[in-house]
Image (cartoon, grey):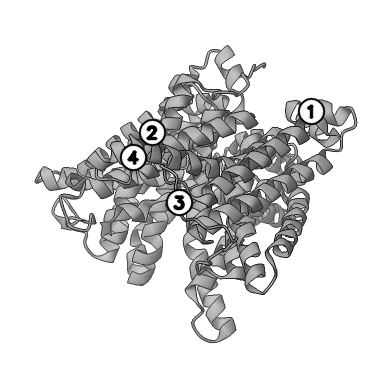
Amino acid sequence: MAFFLEVLIGGLLSGVMYTMVALGFVLIYKASGVFNFAQGSMVLFAALTLVTLIEHGLALPWALGASAVVMLVGAVAVERVVLRPLVHAPPMALFLATLGLAFVLEGFAQLVYGTQVHGLEVGISDAPISGWPIEISKFDLFAAGVAAALVAAIGILFQTTRAGVGLRAVADDPLAAVAVGLDLSRLWAIAWGGAGIVALVAGLLWGARVGVQFSLSLVVLKALPVLIIGGFSSIGGVIAGGLIVGASEKLAEVYVGSHMGGGIETWFPYVLAVGFLLARPTGLFGERLVERV
Amino acid sequence: MSSEATVWPSTVEDENTDGVTVDSREPATPASSPGGGSESAGARAWIPARRSVPRAAFYGIAIVGVAALLVSLPLLVTDYVLSAILVPVLALALAGVGQNLITGYAGQLSVGSAAFMSVGAFATYDISSHVHGLPLLASFAFGGVVAGLVGLFFGLPSLRIRGFYLVVSTLAAQFFVVWLFTKVGWFSNYSASGVITAPKLSIAGIDLSSPGGHYWLSLLVVVPLTVVGRNLVKGRIGRSWMAVRDMETAAAVVGVRTGRAKLLAFGIGSFYCGVAGALWAFAYLGTVEPHGLDLDRSFQVLFIVILGGLGSIAGPFVGAAFVILFPVALDQLGSALVGGSVDPGLLQNVEKIIFGALVILLLIKQPAGMARLLHIAWIRIRRWRSRQA
């Protein structure tokens, strides 16, 4: 039983990490209806920027601030260069454009920062806390706390601030939003900037855990099943989805995978997500779409 | 993506207007002119007037000429060009055609092409190692059919969901297939490394194991399938795909069986990918391992389609040629600039940036891709020539 709980909690905590990444997706999807495939590359790019700054002798807070500025400038550039010309393009073209963006970012990040694995030290140990009956590391708790704070902050921003309301309006109906005088470009830049900051935080936590390396951008693909299960436009759903994916993939790996040669973690979340899609296409908390001709 | 819907029809219109201007300028030369040959017509004899007999003959001769050139290429180019450029271009172009049927025509996003290629390669290998004496093309067809069924299965969620949600289903296919072929030894006939080795290639007793043979085999498979694909998209099925792509709800309202159309797209598209995978494994690499056909390959096929032209049959060929030739050109350029060999990791990153940027640029400037750009260039040249005359 203790072993089961350990696996479960370990899974839930890694689910928190998936949630962090998925949040960036939701932010952009909610604001612009764009499914941003480049979110993973943004995490990689942010983490590499951060770790390179630290290796050049900058203290962590300064490095974080500088990386945040880089991500914000990048967001504005993306809005100018990629999104604005594609305002009237169908969703698929926008998706494919973010796929292109992902390649540009990955190539650029590795060209500038190199391809070797960087260690990232944030000063919180990953060792289990002594004295507790179940092994949980301090770092995992820290990560969970950061995720919770981030979710709360984004939720409050969307509900209360003027920009947040504007973002929701744009997501609902871009034409109507523009008609009542909302500045679409500014709002999109805000959404992408926010996603960039989320990517930076996710990159910080993931990087501290597994090292900053190219595989970061693959870890991020796991955010897709999280989104499917939670619903693309729901922040609460992302939390639930992340926890479900994290816990179920670890449990499946330990209890089912061991009979199947192992390694089912690589595909299990996707199959689970497909199951969800068939049973509940809008996800747990997603909105039901009404289509008109 | 309504703009893609009109790729080919609009080019036909271009030709029409072209023809009309020529006709209106010379009302005195009616349909009988081609044989008679007034001076100005003689000057333009290489572009015969539209719908005249010589024009058909012109195209007939052109097709025969191109066919003869394609078939005789092994006598003209080196083995390196054959086995390192032409064969992979043909294989990837075929996979691109499959991807385009699913994505460019039916509007269903798929990032699982490499998985379907992998299924095709392994199924071809398995059937030819278990059933002795099976003709090579029959085993290719078997590989394609198995890949088609697998594609159909992973396309099932498209019945309930739309658009990019399907990415997850095809990602599931991608990761599951790689895992399956790595973990289950039966598929690779229990070879220790999970790598399969291609059987000897021959058709009706003709040995095809030379680079030229590999090329002819690829040509023999790719050309007929491309013609079939072109007819498919021009026919009833293709129309229903485009209707689903352009507005699914409207398509359903006017009586298109959307579910059937989507599943057909997945089945047929994956069949193409499967055959392409068999070609990739047997005619190009001579071997295949599950990780050789991973997510990156899927993206490569997707890029081939975007760069070449979404919703076009010629597009994937242009795209595949570009994707194979560009790294070679970049490598040459790099060596020429630096004066020695360039770090391959560096080149790979530069390549990634340029591919990504090109994808974005084309989506913004010309969503119908390079095939369309080439066509526009061709029309401009013709206009220019006809003005000169």
- Tell me if I can see residue A204 in this picture: yes
Secondary structure of the residue carrying numbered label 2: helix
CA distance for labels 2 and 4: 47 Å
Q: Nearer the viewer, mark 2 or mark 1?
A: 1
Secondary structure of the residue carrying numbered label 1: helix
Q: Is residue B65 above or below residue A270?
A: below
Say which mark, if any, is on residue B268. 2
Q: Is residue B284 above or below residue A56?
A: above
Task: Evaluate if marks 2 and 1 touch, with contact meaning CB atoms under 8 Å apart.
Answer: no
Specify the amino acid type for callout 4. Phe
Quadrant into which the C terminus of chain A falls: top right
Quadrant into which the N terminus of chain A falls: top left
Q: Are marks 4 and 1 on the same chain?
A: yes
Q: Nearer the viewer, mark 4 or mark 1?
A: 4
Specify the amino acid type for callout 2. Ile
Which residue, given by chain and number where applicable, does mark 4 sit on?
A: A3
Task: Give the letter of the chain under mark 4.
Answer: A
Secondary structure of the residue carrying numbered label 4: helix
Task: Evaluate if marks 3 and 2 touch, with contact meaning CB atoms under 8 Å apart.
Answer: no
Query: Residue B202 in the image: x percent, y percent?
Result: 18, 54
Specify the amino acid type for callout 3. Ser
CA distance for labels 2 and 1: 41 Å
CA distance for labels 3 and 1: 49 Å
Which residue, given by chain and number where applicable, does mark 1 sit on?
A: A169
Query: Residue B68 in the image: x percent, y percent?
Result: 37, 57
Which class describes the residues within 10 Å of circle 3: few (<14), some (14-19), or many (20+)? few
- Tell me if I can see residue A102 in this picture: no
Please give the name of the residue rendered at 21% of the width and 62% of the height, measured from the top-left corner.
Answer: B209
Which residue, given by chain and number where applicable, does mark 3 sit on?
A: A130
CA distance for labels 3 and 2: 58 Å
Q: Nearer the viewer, mark 3 or mark 1?
A: 3
